[in-house]
Image (cartoon, grey):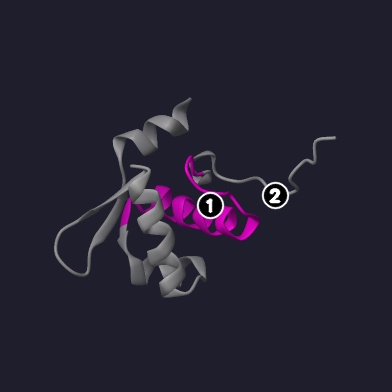
Amino acid sequence: MIRMLKEAYHPNAFLSDLRNIRLGLTARTKILNFLEEKSQADAKTIAKGTGLHYGVVIHHLKLLEAEKIVERKGKRPHVWLLTGLGQKRLKY
């Protein structure tokens, strides 16, 4: 029997190499939705805008960076933005 998820997660929130647990999917969905809305932001701004702790945001941004969904630019504090691949996945 297949269990349906109650929440709708962002399509890019699912990681290919790691287990996708509900808390992680929820956190990554919040981060990705925030970046879609703002186009780019530093981790502190993302944390404030999503209501997540700074450490949680950094952890998930690094996971998303490893999947090439987001990238960081500039010197500290880094600015995070969706990559072309991350945006391309949204369209299909």
Q: Amino acid at mark 2?
A: Glu
Q: Height in image: 75 above or below 37?
A: below
Q: Amino acid at mark 1?
A: Thr
Q: Given contact means CB atoms under 8 Å apart, are the residues at marks 1 and 2 in contact?
A: yes
| Residue at left offset 59%, top offset 56% | 26
Please tell me in which quadrant of the rendered image residue 67 appears. Answer: top left
Residues 15 and 87: in front is: 15
Q: Height in image: 16 above or below 79?
A: above
Q: Does dot 2 land on a helix, a strand or a loop? A: loop
- Image location (x, y in percent) of residue 39: 33, 50
Q: Label 1: few (<14), some or many (≥20) within 10 Å?
A: many
Q: Which residues are magenta?
A: 15-40
- Image location (x, y in percent) of residue 64: 39, 50
- Image location (x, y in percent) of residue 2: 80, 36
Q: Identify the residue under disc 1.
A: 29
| Residue at left offset 64%, top offset 55% | 22
Q: Height in image: 44 above or below 4?
A: below
Answer left or right for 1 relative to 55. Answer: right
Q: Identify the residue under disc 2.
A: 7
Answer left or right for 58 relative to 18. Answer: left
Q: Earlier in the sequence, mark 1 or mark 2?
A: 2
